[in-house]
Image: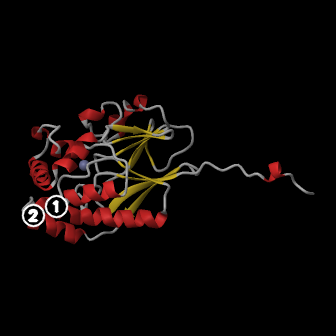
Amino acid sequence: MERSAKNRYIAPRYTMRTAIISDIHSNLEALTAVLSMIDAIQPDNILCLGDIVGYGANPAECVDLIRARGIPAVCGNHDLGAAGVLEEEQFSEAARRGLEWSRKYLSSEQLEYLRSLPLTIDHPDFKAVHSSPDVPMEFRYLFQPLDAAESFDHFSQYLCFVGHTHRPVIFSHAGVEHKIMKDRQYIVNVGSVGQPRDGDWRGCFVLFDSERWSVNHVRVEYDNNMARHKIIDAGLPQKLGDRLMVGV
Ligand code: ZN
């Protein structure tokens, strides 16, 4: 039976894969390795949840790479600290040394870029924010389900992607989850590219598939020894290098 052109028409399916990276922290080795993995996966979009700079030895290179790739980003507390928007007293001693280092090596134009980053990005499927959607400028840490509980009222989408703690995790209203389901709200911490703190030294990012409605944390090996050496050679605190070897 001959089918009409109308019947042969296949409606385009709305499929979208988004790679979400966060907390790069001037770790060029980790960022390069993670972007290579993302390029192999070929998602439709890449998004950055902030803290491009701080702690590590390549702040300018990491800012340049994010901008050259045209990756939209929200601002993290370290980005605003380096740009002089947040008071230095809000950071630990080691973090302050990292920020002072960053400021020396970032051009005024790069600092202006960091200052210009939005606090949140809204997509039809998700909200993106560095720390928490309820008070984005306070950079609250969502470590436990209880910390996340009050955030669920502050985004209208089903998903909110966050970073900041450097620990990959999925929170629902009920607690910690291993996967997401349709029609329920989740806060997904995408982990950290350049300074993981969950006991796994490998760089971390999230791949979100809006067709399968799935969220996967992906781990990427990189030359952490090189990143550590650069930190020590730069005269930054040794512990900022050492922690990269063990992911704490
Ligand atoms: Zn961070």
Badge 2 density bin: few <14, some 14–19, many ≥20, Cα 10 Å: some
- On the image, the x and y values in percent for residue 63 come to 26, 55
Residue 139 image offset from top left, x and y in percent: 25, 37
**Relative to 35, does residue 206 appear above or below in the rendering?**
above
Real-space Cα separation, disc 2 to disc 1, in angstroms: 7 Å
Is residue 194 visible in the rendered image? The answer is no
**Is 56 placed left or right of 6 in the picture?**
left
Mark 2 element type: loop
Q: For residue 101, which quarter of the picture? A: bottom left
Q: Secondary structure at mark 1?
A: loop
Pointer 2 and pointer 1: residues touching (CB < 8 Å)?
yes
**Residue drawn where x is 25% and y is 46% of the image:** 113
Q: Quadrant of the C terminus?
A: bottom left
Name the kind of residue labelled 1 in the image.
Answer: Ala
Q: In this image, 12 relative to 193: left or right?
A: right
Judge by depth and name the residue closer to the eye, 215 or 120: 120
The answer to whether one can see residue 99 in this image is: yes
**Which color scheme is applied?**
secondary structure
Q: Give residue 57's mark.
A: 1
Where does label 2 land, which residue? Answer: 234
Q: Nearer the viewer, residue 90 or 82?
A: 82
**Image point 76% across, 51% down: which residue?**
9
Residue 198: quadrant of the picture? bottom left
